Amino acid sequence: MFVGWEAFQFIAIVADYYAGRVPTGFATWMSALAPACEGRDHLSSASSIPEDPAPRVAQPDLGLVTEDDAASGLAGLAQELIRRLQAAASSATVPEDSLACKRAAESATGIYRLFASDT
């Protein structure tokens, strides 16, 4: 689940980056920010994740990545998050962890829907 937390944090960083640099896509990128933060927060409530995972995610260098490539990449990442979080929810032995994974998968689904048409 910790890797899922990092993936949501990465999505939030990328969304924030493009929201501030692409005026025509501002609404879409800002719309991705909320579910990314929600997914990260859901996983933070799982008992198997460290209490303070924040220092692990570095700011990516997005200067050479087009907006379309970023959107496509986030759609793929969200799709993989959905698959893995649903599997983790099914196999979790702690009810709170299962619920955290289910809710985080719902957040990833929201992100996927935003960017899937761009893939």
Image (tube, helix red, strand yellow):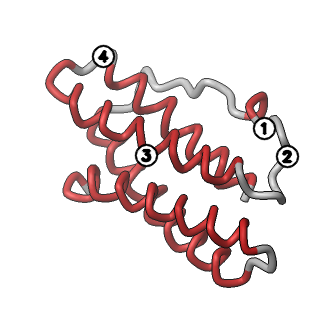
The residue labelled by disc 2 is 50
Answer few, some or many: residues within 10 Å of disc 2's Cα (few below 14, many 20 plus, some between 14 and 19). Answer: few
From what the image shows, is residue 66 above or below residue 84?
above
The residue labelled by disc 3 is 35
Answer few, some or many: residues within 10 Å of disc 1's Cα (few below 14, many 20 plus, some between 14 and 19). Answer: some
Residue 22 placement, left or right of 70 = left
Answer few, some or many: residues within 10 Å of disc 4's Cα (few below 14, many 20 plus, some between 14 and 19). Answer: few
The residue labelled by disc 1 is 53
Residue 67 placement, left or right of 57 = left
Q: Of residues 63 and 40, which is closer to you in this image?
A: 40
Amino acid on which disc 2 is placed: Pro
User: Under tag 2, what secondary structure?
Assistant: loop
> Where does the image place residue 70, in percent across and percent down from the top left?
37, 40
User: Under tag 4, what secondary structure?
Assistant: loop
Q: Earlier in the sequence, mark 3 or mark 4?
A: 4
Q: Earlier in the sequence, mark 3 or mark 1?
A: 3
Do labels 2 and 1 touch, CB within 8 Å? yes
Q: Nearer the viewer, mark 4 or mark 1?
A: 1
User: Under tag 1, what secondary structure?
Assistant: loop
Residue 22 placement, left or right of 2 = left
Marks 3 and 1 sit apart, C-alpha to C-alpha, by 18 Å
Name the residue at 65% across, 83% down: 90
> Where does the image place residue 115, in percent across and percent down from the top left?
28, 51
Q: Of residues 22 and 97, which is closer to you in this image?
A: 97
The residue labelled by disc 4 is 21
Q: Nearer the viewer, mark 4 or mark 2?
A: 2
Q: Which mark is residue 2?
A: none
Q: Of residues 60 and 112, which is closer to you in this image?
A: 112
User: Under tag 3, what secondary structure?
Assistant: helix
